[in-house]
Structure formats: structure tokens, C-alpha cells
Image (cartoon, helix red, strand yellow):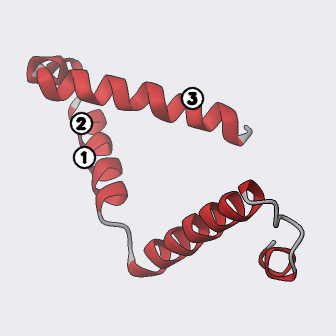
Amino acid sequence: MNIEQSGEQLRAAIQILEKAAASRPLLAVLTSEEHNRLLKAAGDIFQPDPKQRRQFTRARIRHFTRAALSTCGRAKTKFLSLTQ
């Protein structure tokens, strides 16, 4: 699965979660096991363990740094080549 497909799936998941939050009876169709899986996944996203949180933060910083440098025409700088 590539990043674009994952991004599309996450956007779809956001819409579904927003609908569930607006109408809680939608959650009644879930089994107890599915409900627990949903809560665990939401909890893991909301508050991941510290190591994962640091890795994610660093990855986002690298992503936005690359994007900023590429838009100002400095995509092939020494810094950018070191961060890839």
C-alpha cells in the first residue's frame, strides 16, 4: 500500500469517525470486540508511546523542511541531502 492510498483511507476514516461522533447510536452495531478495537486504536493515535511520538514528530519536521526548501528553490542543498 502506498502513501497516497493510505492518505485516502485515513481521510475516509476521519469522515466515518466524525459521523459516529455526531450520532453515537451508529456505534451500537459494533460487537464488544470491535468496540474495544476502535477505542484502542483511537487511544493509540491520541497518545502513542513516547518513542513513537518522537519518531513521528521528527518525520513531520523532516517532511515540512523538505517541502519548504523545495518551494524556495533550495531542494539540492547539503542539508536536504543529509536528511534524506
* CA–CA distance in space, label 2 to label 1: 6 Å
Amino acid on which the number 3 mark rests in the picture: Glu
Q: Can residue 29 be seen in this view?
A: yes
Which of the numbered marks, if any, corresponds to residue 35? 2
Circle 1 or circle 3, nearest the eye: 3
Q: Mark 1 points at which residue?
A: 39
What is the x, y in percent for residue 62?
65, 70
| Residue pictured at 30% horizontal, 49% vertical | 42
Label 1 crowding class (10 Å Cα cut-off): few <14, some 14-19, many 20+? few
Q: Which amino acid does label 2 sit on?
A: His
In which quadrant will I find the C terminus? bottom right
Q: Is residue 41 above or below residue 46?
A: above
Q: Which of marks 2 and 3 is in front?
A: 3
Q: Distance between the residues labelled 2 and 3?
A: 23 Å
C-beta proximity under 8 Å, tags 2 and 1:
yes
Mark earlier in primary sequence (1, 3): 3
Task: Let me know if residue 30 appears in the view.
Answer: no
3 displayed left or right of 8: right
What label sits on residue 8 in the rendered view? 3
Element class at badge 1: helix
10 versus 65 height, above or below: above
Q: In which quarter of the image is residue 17?
A: top left
> Does label 2 or label 3 sit earlier along the sequence?
3
> For the point 13% across and 23% down, which residue is it?
22
Mark number, residue 31: none
Image quarter of the N terminus:
top right
Q: Nearer the viewer, residue 3 or 72?
A: 72
Percent of width and height locating residue 56: 52, 68
For the point 17% across and 17% down, the residue is 26
User: Dot 3, how many residues are within 10 Å of its Cα: few (below 14), some (14-19), or many (20+)?
Assistant: few
